[in-house]
Amino acid sequence: MSAGLPEELHGLKSWTPEPTELADLELLLAGAFRPLRGFLGSLDTAAVVAGGRLADGTPWPSPVLLSVPDELADQARLILQDPEGVPLAVLQVAEAWRDPRLPEGRVRLAGPLTPLRRPAYGAFHRLRRTPAELEITPGRDGRLLAVATREPLHRKQLGQLRQEAERLGAPALVLALLSGAHEQELVRALLAVQKDLPEGSRIVPVNLAPRPGGREQELRAHVAAAYGATHLLTSLPMDGEVPLAVVAPEPWAYDLDVEVWRPVARIEDGHVRAELSAEELGELLDQGAPIPEWFTPPAVAVELRRARPPRHERGVTVFFTGLSGSGKSTVARGLADALVENGGRTVSLLDGDVVRQMLSSGLTFSKSDRDLNIRRIGYVAAEATRHGGLAICAPIAPYAATRAEVRRMVEAVGDFVLVHVATPLEECERRDRKGLYAKARAGLIPEFTGISDPYEEPEDADLVLDTTGLSTEEAVGAVLKLLTAGGWVR
């Protein structure tokens, strides 16, 4: 860890921030979050949450926060590193504070940052530019029109952008907002239409993490302004003060008469066709149907299909959860066998007991280790899903928060199907071949799910099975019916 560090930093502890915090760190170091120089403290955070301003009154829309384990709370300086252990910056800790939104054992650290080296991870890194590095010539009166997007630009958006850029006499700065999910396809889709952008325009990937709870639009405006933009093109409302002019695009539609996109005001009644809705586009992609050229350029359609293949080719995780003895492992194995026999999908079975031996050997049955075991299963399942496979998982997974974490991991790269094997506790005890329930009731096994530790029943299950009166074939058939109806299995 200390290799390549200045001598005065040797011996400092280091920490790898969470993905959202790491994205914020990159923008802080780049100067894209100006006037911020580091992570926010308690007073600034409270002021931002309450009124969209820092404690000194400076407009700022969203908290920029760092959390660490309690054991790092007493550090005066802390090295922040990337996931590969490369040191990126030194945090001069000005405040360690408790945030009620954090889980137990975590604390916020705030303070200014000293850069060590530029982040160098992620695809299309060669295209990333800091505000100081951006080479773009503003237009009339120094104007620069920005678009900040997590979605490709289709024919409608391209037409609106060209129209507004021409009105302003400005080139366009397209900020491709990376979020971890299908970001490569987004950048490729934007590069595919670069020739259709106003002359002198630039595309810059920006690692801006999504902001739950709102005010992301305002944060986009601050980032665009840091890159020199004077105007931001968006149809979404702004709730707070922003440092540039916000312009809404004129409504456009497809003119069925002359077969071009143009302002709605110039189209005769009865000849207007709106763009595809997100639901209509998603249905076409799920079915593997062609994306019409009137809606988007063919090169963009290629990237849409890469990001969202048809369901029968898309990676999916089938995640069974239930009490010990509920039958989830038996049904999961039966499902894996049936899918292998059917052919057409690559199947990976991650059974709870097998994973404990091969992937999580050495973990205890404490709550923290059980959660870590489920996260490991989720990570492997997500990787199988990422590459178009079908992963089948069968752990107990008693806690809703951990299951939700796995769902988020998988849904970032594919689909997630949750099956709750809801066999009653009494039936699970009756089937208990290993005598685990008897040992748990005798106090010989602590924190045993269903006896001395809770099982949080899912509220988001796609299928609920009680195997009390079901044969294995019937239970497997119910899951196969769900997967077939959903289009994941033919």
Image (tube, rainbow, N blue to C red):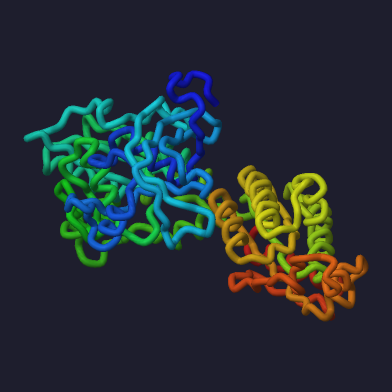
Q: Position of residue 321 (x, y in %)?
A: 71, 65
Q: How many marks?
A: 0
> The C terminus is located in which quarter?
bottom right
The residue depicted at 81 percent of the width and 75 percent of the height is 467
Name the residue nearer the viewer: 432 or 489: 432
The answer to whether one can see residue 304 in this image is no
Q: Residue at x 79, y 51 (%)?
A: 356
Front residue of this view, candidates 275 and 313: 313
Task: Tell me which corner region of the image, top left, top right, bottom left or bottom right, holds residue 117.
Answer: top left
Asked whether 479 or 16 is in front, the reply is: 16
Which of the 4 quarters of the picture holds residue 473?
Answer: bottom right
Q: Residue furthest left?
A: 141
- Residue at 73% over, 57% down: 393
Q: Is residue 490 left or right of residue 212?
A: right
Quick check: 341 left or right of 230?
Answer: right
Residue 323 location, x and y as percent?
76, 70
For the N terminus, which image quadrant?
top right
Say left or right for 1 vs 299: right
Q: Position of residue 365 (x, y in %)?
A: 75, 58
Note whether 4 is above or below 150 in the view shown: above
* Residue 83 picture location, percent across and down: 53, 35
Visible residue check, residue 136: yes
Residue at 34% from the left image edge and 33% from the top image edge: 29
